Image (spheres, helix red, strand yellow):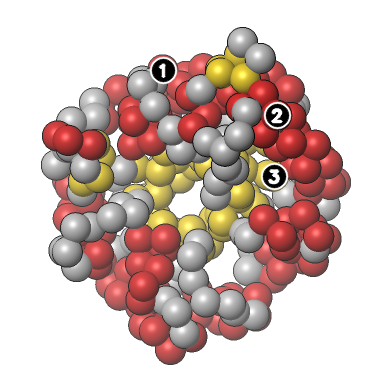
Amino acid sequence: MKLGAQFFTLRDFCQDLDSFSESLKKVAEIGYKTVQISGTCVFEAEWLKAELDKNGLECVITHTPAKKLLHQTEKTAQEHDVFGCRYVGLGSFPFNGGQESESYAEFLRLYKPVASKLKALGKYFMYHNHSGEFQKAAGRLILRAMAEDIPADEMGFTLDTYWVQAGGGDPAWWIEFLKGRVPCIHLKDYAYGGKMAVVGEGNINFDRVFEKAQETGTEYMLVEQDECYGENPFDCLKRSYDYLHSLGFN
């Protein structure tokens, strides 16, 4: 499994192309070889490819804005072709709004066709969970319902260890349950009081996470920390990298 950095962690440092370019350089200097692009300024696909090549990085997954996924699906796939990225991600869906059964039905209505179309275009649609997917819709846990209602060859899951635990789930159990559908995971630790933490500085049982991820075919482990509580996000990414590197991951 390869280590990567989720750029949503660095979103405040990527709001113009110059700072985005500098952030890619800094992430490569830490030692990361792969990245997820999310939360940055608008960029051209050719620009990103050049920047990735310059820094010896590979973009393995994105979080693509919902409007673009829904209304420019083919263009989205073509852009991902330019910088060599198979996994096209949706970062969230508002399951916390309104009646859960209604919002889940709306998710299926909107994104099941997107998943199917991306497959036909040679891409794989990836859904990133928060805690809202651990509610029930019409008697079924939403995350389980998603796995049952959309074929495995059309949609995978970027399982987020922090948000699974925040929702009351066991990250390792869900990685195993979704076997073959979690090519990418988000490594984010859960500390006392629900704080997000540097990997290895919280309380998630990462030994089991790594074991199940290895067993079930996860390819990329992407470090993410949405909130750094006043610390420098680059320092947080480095501490996570150093911890994971000490365990033999690169």
Q: Earlier in the sequence, mark 2 or mark 1?
A: 2
Tell me the residue at 61%/10% (across/down).
Answer: 139
Q: Amino acid at mark 1?
A: Trp
* Left or right placement of residue 146 versus residue 4 in this view: right
- Disc nearest the viewer among 3 and 2: 2
Q: Earlier in the sequence, mark 1 or mark 3?
A: 3
- Tell me how far mark 2 sits from mark 1, CA to CA: 27 Å
Instruction: Give the answer, above or below, for where 159 lies relative to 15.
Output: above
- Tell me how far mark 3 sits from mark 2, CA to CA: 25 Å
Q: Secondary structure at mark 3?
A: strand
* Left or right placement of residue 109 versus residue 147 in this view: right
User: Where residue 231 sits in the image (x, y, percent)?
Assistant: 16, 63
- Disc 3 crowd rating (10 Å Cα; few below 14, some 14-19, many 20+) is many
Q: Which residue is mark 1?
A: 173
Tell me the residue at 40%/43% (across/down).
Answer: 186
Q: Nearer the viewer, residue 201 or 247?
A: 201
Q: Earlier in the sequence, mark 3 or mark 2?
A: 2
**Residue located farthest toward the top when viewing the structure as drawn:** 139
Tell me the residue at 34%/30% (across/down).
Answer: 166
- Say if residue 176 shows up in the picture: yes
Q: Which residue is mark 3?
A: 124
Q: Quadrant of the N terminus?
A: top left
The disc at residue 214 is none
Q: Secondary structure at mark 1?
A: helix
Q: Nearer the viewer, residue 161 or 142?
A: 142
Q: Nearer the viewer, residue 79 or 9?
A: 9
Q: Which residue is mark 2?
A: 102
User: Where residue 183 sits in the image (x, y, percent)?
Assistant: 54, 38
Tell me the residue at 56%/56% (across/down).
Answer: 63
User: Where residue 227 sits in the image (x, y, percent)?
Assistant: 28, 55
* Left or right placement of residue 240 versus residue 72 in this view: left
- Disc nearest the viewer among 2 and 1: 2
